Image (cartoon, grey):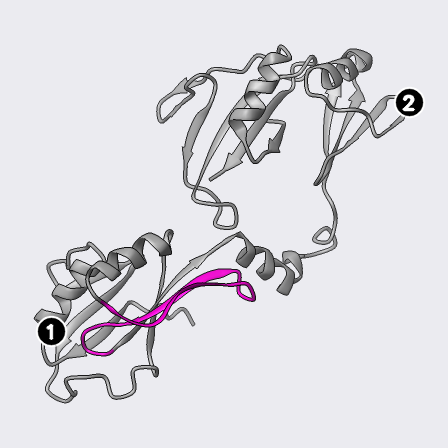
Amino acid sequence: MDLPIGSILLASTEPGRLRAWYEQAFDMKADGDGFLNFGGVGVLIDGRDDVAGRAAEPARVILNLHVKDAQALAERLDGLGVTWIAELEYRETGGAWFATLADPDGNILQLIELGPDYWRLKRERLGHGHTGLLGAAAVATRLPAQDLERARRFYAEKLGLEVAEERPGGLLYNLRQGSFVLFQSTGQSAGEFTQMAFTVDDLDAVVAQLRERGVEFEEVDIPGFKTVDGIVEVEGNYPSKGTRERGCWFRDSEGNLIGVGQSI
């Protein structure tokens, strides 16, 4: 059965006061029906005459708010003088930041910021999300090269990468995580899309070093996507990676389009 939770009701003897607190605390405004929108789930604060002024068992129902910046929100709430049940802390076992507080009626809320460790631990708990026979396989990129020796020189001289192993018609490169292969091919890469991407910790430093080695970066200018000095800022990211991304592209000696990205 498809039974999504459409909304959550918080009953109060003083709904106007409690609603105003939520609006101020989380910098939001209730809609025309009185709902506060928390990421697609509406919280309705309404008056009832069959409840007490304070929550009798506040730990029975807890609102978990998943936030992008728990520290910034905690500082904001500190300024409002909230009552902290548990101050903000990083829990290594969960790979996330947690803080617990009470609203003016005594209802309990938790601020939760899920970090990269959370998603890594989740993948481990779930067996890395393996499905089917290929779910447990490793993946490796294959890039065509019309001139394998020319490609070897480019990757060594421009990118500082040395061949780990080779065989007739193929060069294998091992990185900190993952590997890729250059293979001899009579075909030519169209280079119209990203064929391989490196993920780095400091994009600016990498770009500066590669430019010193003579690598030329692509400039892109399309609606909603524009590079500035070769680098584009991308809004949004996969939850396990961060909140946004910076990236750039260059072509290798064989015309393959290579990306370099940094998660933020």
Residue under the point 60% across and 19% down = 209
What are the residue bounds of the magenta stretch? 82-106
Q: CA distance from mark 2 to mark 1?
A: 75 Å
Asked which quadrant contains residue 166, the reply is top right
> Is 239 left, or right, of 102 in this rendering?
right
Q: Is residue 215 above or below residue 245?
A: above
Among numbered discs 2 and 1, the one appearing first in the sequence: 1
Residue at mark 1: 15
Type of amino acid under label 1: Pro
Q: Position of residue 248 (x, y in %)?
A: 52, 24
Q: Is residue 68 above or below residue 157?
A: below
Residue under the point 19% across and 78% down = 105
Residue under the point 61% across and 18% down = 210
Q: Nearer the viewer, mark 2 or mark 1?
A: 1
- Element at label 1: helix
Magenta highlight on residue 256: no
